[in-house]
Amino acid sequence: MSSVEILRKYAAGETNFRGINLKGIQLNRADLIGANFSEADLHGADLVLAFLNRVNFQRANLITAKLSGAYLTQANLQAVNMADVDLHGANLQNADFRLANLELATLIDANLSGADMRGINLQGADLRGAYMRGANLRYEKRAYEIANLRGVNLRGADLRGVDLTGADLTKADLRGANLSEVLLRDAKLTKANLSQVILDGAFLTEANLAGVNLSGASLINAKIERAGLIDTRLNQANLTGAIMADVKLGKAQLVRANLTQVNLVRADLSRANLSQANLSKADLTDAYLAKANFRNSNLNDSILTRVELSTANLSGAQMQGASMPNGDIHD
């Protein structure tokens, strides 16, 4: 069916185009609001700047389709195949992407606020500058698989308050993204780049952050209990007030990091580099500090109850008012 026929039928009131072959069709700037293209083949279609609000694309084939600048608010994109699709600057507010495949898709500056993205595959997608506040990527057992965000580019994206519980963000680029109050419990962030990211108030309990770059990141009041941060880079990161009980920070780099009033109870900091870090009023009760480097760090008023310090490097460290392992208060 040609674009002329589609537009003529739509103008006449017909909206059901289910299952038809529309490969490579030219429908840029078309007004097809509310149409039904479920299970249709739109491989390589040109829908640039089209009005597709509330359109039903469920299980449709939109591989390599061009949808930059398109209006897809409240569109039904369940189980759609949108691999390598161009959605640059598209408005996808409150769209339904459940179980959709957007592998290698371009979503630069797209509006995905309120979108339902449970079970989505975004592996290798480009979401630089995307607005995703309120999007739902929550993992639900027996309902939706873990969201696949492996290698995704979310640089500078706005994901405030997004539920990414259990999400796979391995090797994702999140530099400068806003992840304030995001839920990342049990998330996989191995080798992800989160430098300069904002994670204030985020929930990272039991998250796997091994080898992650968090240099210069803001994690004020973040919940990071039992997280894996082995070999993680946190140089100059701001962790003020963070809860990091039972965290694994072996060989982590925390040079000049701000750890003021951080809860590091039972944390493993073996061989971690905390030179010039600020740990004033930090609670390190029962922490493991074997060969940790605290050179020129600030440990004033910190709590070091039952901590073994014999192999830690404390040269030049300030420890005024610190509660020492033997119960004494350091002068």
Image (spheres, grey):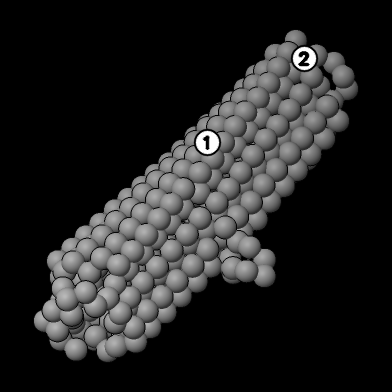
Q: Which amino acid type is marked by label 2?
A: His
How many labels, in total? 2
Q: CA distance from mark 2 to mark 1?
A: 32 Å
> Of tags 2 and 1, which is closer to the observer?
1
Which residue occupies the extreme front position in the image?
13
* Residue drawn 68% across the image and 21% down it: 281
Check if mark 2's residue and mark 1's residue have beta carbons within 8 Å: no
Q: Is residue 224 left or right of residue 119?
A: right
Horizontal and vertical percent for residue 234? 54, 41
Q: Which amino acid type is marked by label 1?
A: Asp
Q: Is residue 278 left or right of residue 38?
A: right
Residue 94, image quadrant: bottom left
**Is residue 297 in view?**
no
Quadrant occupied by the N terminus: bottom left
* Residue drawn 67% across the image and 18% down it: 300
- How crowded pointer 2 is (Cα within 10 Å; few <14, some 14-19, many 20+) is rated as some
Horizontal and vertical percent for residue 246? 75, 43
Secondary structure found at label 2: loop
Q: Which sits in the foreground, 210 or 219? A: 219
Secondary structure found at label 1: loop
- How crowded pointer 1 is (Cα within 10 Å; few <14, some 14-19, many 20+) is rated as many
Quadrant occupied by the C terminus: top right
Q: Which sits in the foreground, 166 or 321? A: 166
Mark positioned earlier in the residue sequence (2 or 1): 1
* Residue drawn 29% across the image and 88% down it: 20
The correct choice, above or below, for 287 with respect to 98 in the image is: above
Residue located beneath label 2 in the image = 330
Q: Which sits in the foreground, 149 or 79? A: 79
Horizontal and vertical percent for residue 248? 70, 47
Residue located beneath label 1 in the image = 200
Which residue occupies the extreme left position in the image?
4
